[in-house]
Amino acid sequence: MRFKRGVSIQKGELDLIPLVNIIFLLFIFFIITSGFIFQPGLTVDLPRVVTSEIIPKESLEVVVAKNNTVYLNERPVTDEELISRFRIAAREGKPVLIKADRQGAFGSVVRILDLCRQEGVRGINVATTQEGRS
């Protein structure tokens, strides 16, 4: 193999400005689109207490909103639907967790507690937010 004399290898240069521009545009894109991702769900302002316990996640969650609407799995339900779900929960030995808004009527919570006891649910819990001790 014969090489020509006087030929030198030139070192190539990498232009970083287009790379930086693309990374900057991707960064802006992800910042803007992440602002449009909303978590669906109900906003419930739970009552605050000093003493509380952690409840296992596998319980049946019933939410009482501020306007006294009762939700099960984030959809409004009637008393008949609640009764049938409470029967299934009692049969499976599943506890029920009641999340009631602080501004809601206490009568709605008592009605749900009564329905739970009628159907034989053993574990009935009320969700709260723990308040710091002074």
Image (cartoon, grey):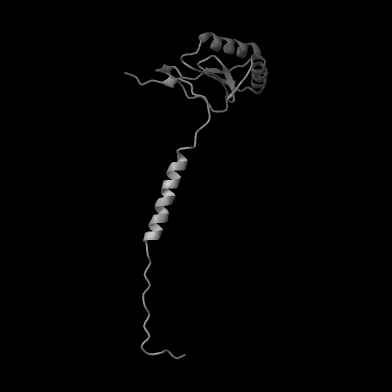
Task: Residue at the far top: name it.
Answer: 107
Above/below status of 80 relative to 92: above
Residue depicted at 40% across the width and 59% down the height? 19
Task: Residue at the far left: name it.
Answer: 134
Query: Would you say 62 lies left or right of 19 here?
Result: right
Front residue of 70 and 37: 37
Front residue of 81 and 119: 81
Q: How many marks?
A: 0
Residue depicted at 52% across the width and 18% down the height? 65
Front residue of 133 and 65: 65
Quarter location, residue 91: top right
Residue 83, percent from left and from top = 66, 16
Residue depicted at 62% across the width and 19% down the height? 77
- The quadrant of the rendering that contains the C terminus is top left
Residue 30, percent from left and from top = 45, 45
Query: Would you say 117 lies left or right of 134 here?
Result: right
Quarter location, residue 64: top right
Residue 102, percent from left and from top = 46, 15
Residue depicted at 48% across the width and 37% down the height? 36
Residue 99, percent from left and from top = 52, 19
Query: Would you say 78 lies left or right of 9 here?
Result: right
Quarter location, residue 8: bottom left
Above/below status of 20 relative to 81: below
Front residue of 111 and 20: 20
